[in-house]
Amino acid sequence: MFIDTDEHGEQVQWKGPMDKENHTLLPTQPPHNQIYQQSWPDYPLPANRHQPLDEPGRPAAHKEYQNAGAVMEGQFPDEDRRWRKLLDYYFNCIRDNDQHLEAILNELDNLQLTQNTIIVFTADHGELGGSHQMHGKGSSVYKEQIHVPMIIRHPAYPGNIRCNSLTNHLDLVPTLIGLTGRDRSLREKSGGQKRPGYEPITGAS
């Protein structure tokens, strides 16, 4: 997630490895609408947000990835007010997304399609959001990055059922084909078989 955490008239984040004019991304500010004006001052910041990137035992890839990201979005200073601004933006993006999702669900009701529709809610990755002094995604398997929602609403099954199994997005296509009632041979062709190199990876917390 790219966000300019500099205050008005400040140029700190953008004094990274490249000057502001040569960054590959322009400074990104939250949209100027009401939903992005909300702040979350009482939300606790990650307790490990000041963990040094070069701490003994940490993979070198963590620091290298953050440095590579700085080429695109500036060097992100390790300051609480900046982590707060990043998380405010992230939470408001979620609220914005939820409003659009609500509109889709309402339209399904209006069209009387809800009872004939399988709804899947998921994401490709999370947001480190200051955990381990990192933001964005990539180069780690921390819980904040890889633990994403997987919510399936099927009209033929009761709701409020939780599953604690480890899943992978490779499971999505064969699962969806199975939910539509197609035969097993098609599900197997979709990639549901075990394949070398796709063993489960357990994330660190």
Image: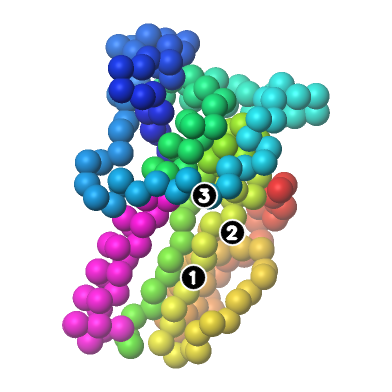
Taking the image as shown, residue 24 lies to the left or right of residue 69, namely left
Q: CA distance from mark 3 to mark 2?
A: 33 Å
Spatial CA distance of label 2 from label 1 is: 13 Å
Examine the rendering and report whether any part of residue 129 can be seen: yes
Within-10-Å neighbours for mark 2: few <14, some 14–19, many 20+: few
Is label 2 in a helix, a strand or a loop?
loop
Question: Which residue is denoted by mark 1 in the rendering?
Answer: 151
Magenta region, main secondary structure:
helix
For discs 1 and 3, the disc positioned in front in the rendered view: 3
Q: Give the class, few, some or many, for how many residues have Cα within 10 Å of label 3's Cα (few <14, many ≥20).
A: few
Provide residue 138's location: percent of width, then percent of height. Answer: 56, 37
Residue 89: percent from left, percent from top: 39, 43
Horizontal side of residue 152 vs 21, given as left or right: right
Q: Give the mark, 2 or 1, whose residue is nearer the N terminus.
A: 1
The part of the chain drawn in magenta is: 91-114
Residue 27 in magenta stretch: no
- Magenta stretch containing residue 104, yes or no? yes
- Amino acid type at image mark 2: Asn
